[in-house]
Image: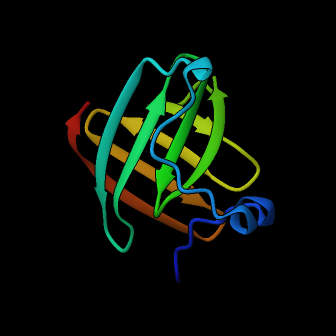
Amino acid sequence: MAFSLALPPLVLSLGLLAQGSPWWEHYETTDTFLCPRLGRVMLERNASQASLIAGGYRSTMFRDDANLPGTRYRNERMTLILRGDILSIQQPQSQIECTRTDRV
């Protein structure tokens, strides 16, 4: 099954070239990960939300306090699960595991 980082049409049509988040979002942690088929992605996060930046596009997710292993963030299209140095990106019919490369 093919994996695609699905983004809303509005974001795609704007051609948003995300380099980092605006100061008012106040992300406390920024990590980079290496993912099969996606290459390098950046995850900015705090206690309540996260932003995944991949291929010049951004997708924002909110904290999921499910009683399951890992720190979880989700939106209507995907779920992120952070367990140590592994980031799992899950969509309805696909999953990809990424490995942390460094912490900014």
Q: Residue at x 45, y 46 (%)?
A: 19
Please tell me which residue lies in front, 45 or 79: 45
Q: Could one spot residue 69 in this view of the protein? A: no
Judged from this view, the residue extending furthest toward the right is 10
Residue 1 relative to residue 65: left or right: left
Q: Is residue 13 above or below residue 102?
A: below
- Give the quadrant of the C terminus: top left
Q: Residue at x 65, y 29 (%)?
A: 64
Q: Could one spot residue 30 in this view of the protein? A: yes
Q: Position of residue 12 (x, y in %)?
A: 70, 66
Q: Residue at x 49, y 27 (%)?
A: 45
Q: Position of residue 81 (x, y in %)?
A: 48, 41
Quarter holding residue 82: top left
Q: Is residue 67 above or below residue 84?
A: above
How many numbered discs? 0
Q: Position of residue 31 (x, y in %)?
A: 32, 36
Q: Position of residue 67 (x, y in %)?
A: 59, 24
Q: Residue at x 80, y 61 (%)?
A: 10
Quarter holding residue 16: bottom right
